[in-house]
Image: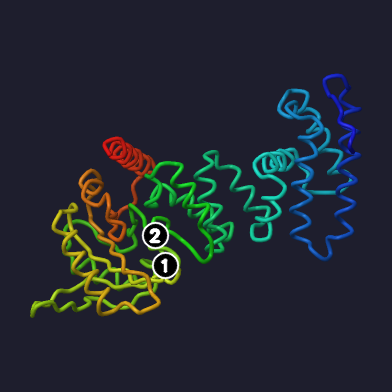
Amino acid sequence: MNDKIDISNAGQPLATNHLLLGIETLIEKTGRNAAVYLNTEINRLYWSIGNYIITEIGFETYSQQGRQILATLSQRLTEKFGKGYTYSALTRMIKIAETYSEEMFATLSQTLSWSHFIELVAIENPVKRLFYQQMCIIENWSIRTLRQKQDAMLFERTAIAAKPEDEILQTLQKTDNTHISPDLVFKSTYIIDFLGLSGYYSEKDLENAILAELEKFILELGQGFAFIERQKRIPIDSVDYSLDLLFYHRKLCRLVAIDLKLGRFKPKYKGQMELYLKYLQKHDRQPHENPPIGLLLCSEGNTEHIEFLLLDEPNIKVAQYLTELPDKQWFVEKLNKSIAIAQQNISNK
């Protein structure tokens, strides 16, 4: 197995036989240990097969001759070992071995299944792939959940998506089960089409609809949120204010104040939320908790206003809510606009 074959100088049968012999050895060796660590060993086997093919034929993997060798190899492996070695399966093994080093794969495969890896390597953008990889681990996503989150364009809707790539990478690399950034928890857009609202409705109608569908609303907020109170009374200087919704986030370990607004974000909403957060900090925050964080949910987006007014305000988030689901291009265009504004703000500093 250590003698690399040059397929440019070898015929297809010779190259196929060489690969077949090496992979047979890998499969048979793994079979002896599979009863004990079945999932981990199978994952490692598939990675090893992909890595072995890369090592043996290198860049020729994607040449015409390389593809012919893989097709023949797939047929021979299937005849001997049964299902699981189709041409597509072999190309996925190669892709995963190219994307993940042996050490990284061994670490991640303790949590992620082979099906997770297949879904992840299909994501071409490495930052986006790392986001979904980390969230799978932190929130223990099933394959079905991972697919649903991608279909719902979670990355594009998450607050961190508009930040520079190096900042996103640093945040994701620091993220684990004990530490998660609010920018990974909060979104720039929330889809609440399950509320059945259309046409004219008031803020009270919106609040009542959310409470009637509280479970679905919490699922849209994301994992870790717990509902505490509606119309939270905030008395200051003999004036009673009311916070629409109060939640708690377990991993952030902090109170989350949510205020619902019709129309676009207005500068006065920032001052109002700051007042609520200072009250919660003084009267409701427990000693072990992090400072409260606020989320202003507006029915219309005005990204530039938000970027300028909240540039240095990490504890106040503003997001748009949609009562009807738009097409995916809408999310892409909104994200691109947010990125452009954020880059301009950085250049102006």
Closer to us: 157 or 169: 169
Residue furthest front as drawn: 349
Circle 1 — which element? loop
- Total labels: the figure holds 2
Q: Amino acid at mark 1?
A: Leu
Which residue does the image show at 23% across and 49% down from the upper left? 306
Looking at the picture, does residue 159 appear above or below residue 60? below
| 117 horizontally vs 261: left or right | right
According to the image, label 2 marks what residue? 182
Which residue does the image show at 79% across and 36% down from the upper left? 53
Which residue does the image show at 90% across and 33% down from the upper left? 3
Closer to us: 69 or 106: 106
Q: CA distance from mark 1 to mark 2?
A: 7 Å
Q: In x, y percent, where is residue 155?
A: 44, 49
Closer to us: 325 or 277: 277
First-in-chain label (1 vs 2): 2
Question: Where on the picture, by quarter, is residue 225?
Answer: bottom left
Q: In x, y percent, where is residue 122?
A: 59, 42
Which residue does the image show at 35% across and 42% down from the upper left? 335
Q: In x, y percent, where is residue 211?
A: 30, 73
Q: In x, y percent, where is residue 89?
A: 72, 43
According to the image, label 1 marks what residue? 252
| 48 horizontally vs 104: left or right | right
- The residue carrying pointer 1 sits among few (fewer than 14), some (14 to 19) or many (20 or more) residues within 10 Å by Cα, namely many
Looking at the picture, does residue 334 appear above or below residue 201? above
Q: Are marks 1 and 2 in contact (CB under 8 Å)?
A: yes
Q: Amino acid at mark 2?
A: Pro
